[in-house]
Amino acid sequence: MEPYFWKTCFFLALILLFVALCFLLLSFRRLKYQKERSAFLSSILEANRNELKASLLLRLCYLSQPEPEGLAPTLSFFDLEQELKHTVVALVHFPGSSGLSNSFHKDAFRNLQESLLTLCQDTAGEFFPSFWFWETPDTLLAILSIGENLSESLCLPILNQLGERLQKACARDEDERPPVIAFGNLISSKELLHRSYEEAAELLNHKLHNHISIPYSYQEFQRTEIQFDYHKQQLLARYIRLGKAQEASTFLNSYFSVIHANPYTSVAYVREITDQILDLISSIVKEMPVVLADCAPLLTHAKEQTEHLAHVHDFGQFLLPFVQTICNFIGAVSANKGKVKIDGLISWIQENYHQDLSLEDMAAHIGCSPAYTSKLFKKETNYDIITYLSSVRIRHAKELLCTTKMTLEEISAAVGFNHQQTFIRNFKKQTGLTPTEYRNSTVSTS
């Protein structure tokens, strides 16, 4: 019995040993697979590191709410916790790139984008460490890592230098519009990255809308844009003269949003700006007699209203609809500009019929060519312009024939005809009688 027992134990030990070896072999293979899989995934992550990092940074730029819990490990993987301390968001917009994407082959356009990205990264690298990527086909986004020892006041002149260098470096052709560059404010943590991005985007949109290349930084933009300078006055005046209510409203909305965002803006200063805008509108309206009667009471009422406004935001809320109303009046006149021109010309003819007027003189009065003036007059009145001038002269000649003893030669000259025969011919054509016959008929009737 005893040899059988030991024999059984021996076989059981062999079986257990075999199972252990199989288990070790499977564990080794599984460990090797996981290691290979980990290496493969790491290689994929490394190969797409920039794309993943760009996607993560873009998400942080768009994320105004606190970051999701799952985002923290990803930030750690890319070592972004330290990198996003003391940073500035930069946007570089290339005005012609959208058109190039349609006209270029995809590979050629991709090569162009890569060259521009490398150029910007190399240029910015002379100032700050940075990470660049394409936000849209025509706009580059960059995260500039500013040193902790660099204050915001010291950072501003350096950003201006960087903006100038980027603009010069990226200008592909002298005939092309240079890139538009905007920097947000300096931030101290990743939670504020969206704020710097929003500031850069606001400045970029403002520069694109107003076709300006400076300022480069949002901080400088806040300082300069609060002033209602000559450029802003001319831009607003242009929109109002053309009756462009939407453009004028957008401009004022953008301008007053900057004023409202500045906590140091005083009511007295905004009141002064509002008075400047109302004076500007008043001067424009006075140039346009056709809208003066409608707009003058509105302007008087507006100036009275602004005296009672007590808060900074009240002025913007009051001016926006007011300017839209003025633009709508002017726009309505502009839509019927031809009739306005001809009405003005008719009044002028009736006052100056006695002078030696030519088609060129009448065309010059309304600022049009002779051919266009003749065509426009016919369209608006259904009369030939020369025939109308002649009819005005004949009407006044009839009055003189009936009420005075002036000779035909004197009457002819008094109503604007150069020659007596021309006067007689035109008079008979319109009345069927010669001037003498007309005078005699009126005398016999009376």
Image (tube, rainbow, N blue to C red):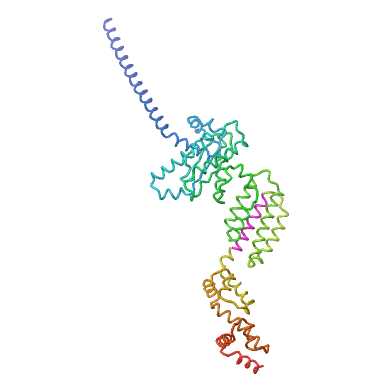
Q: Is residue 361 left or right of residue 310?
A: left
At a point 58% along the width and 63% down the height, the residue shown is 331
Q: Position of residue 106 (x, y in %)?
A: 39, 45
Q: Is residue 22 left or right of residue 183?
A: left
At a point 44% along the width and 42% down the height, the residue shown is 113
Q: Main secondary structure of the magenta part?
A: helix
Instruction: Tell me the magenta residue range.
Output: 313-330
Establish if 385 lies above or below 51: below
Q: Quadrant of the N terminus?
A: top left
Q: Nearer the viewer, residue 384 or 1?
A: 384
Q: Position of residue 144 (x, y in %)?
A: 53, 36
Q: Nearer the viewer, residue 287 or 47?
A: 287
Q: Position of residue 131 (x, y in %)?
A: 49, 36
Q: Position of residue 246 (x, y in %)?
A: 57, 56
Establish if 442 lies above or below 267: below
Q: Quadrant of the C terminus?
A: bottom right
User: Is 324 included in the stretch rendered in magenta?
Assistant: yes
User: Is 261 included in the stretch rendered in magenta?
Assistant: no
At a point 60% along the width and 73% down the height, the residue shown is 345
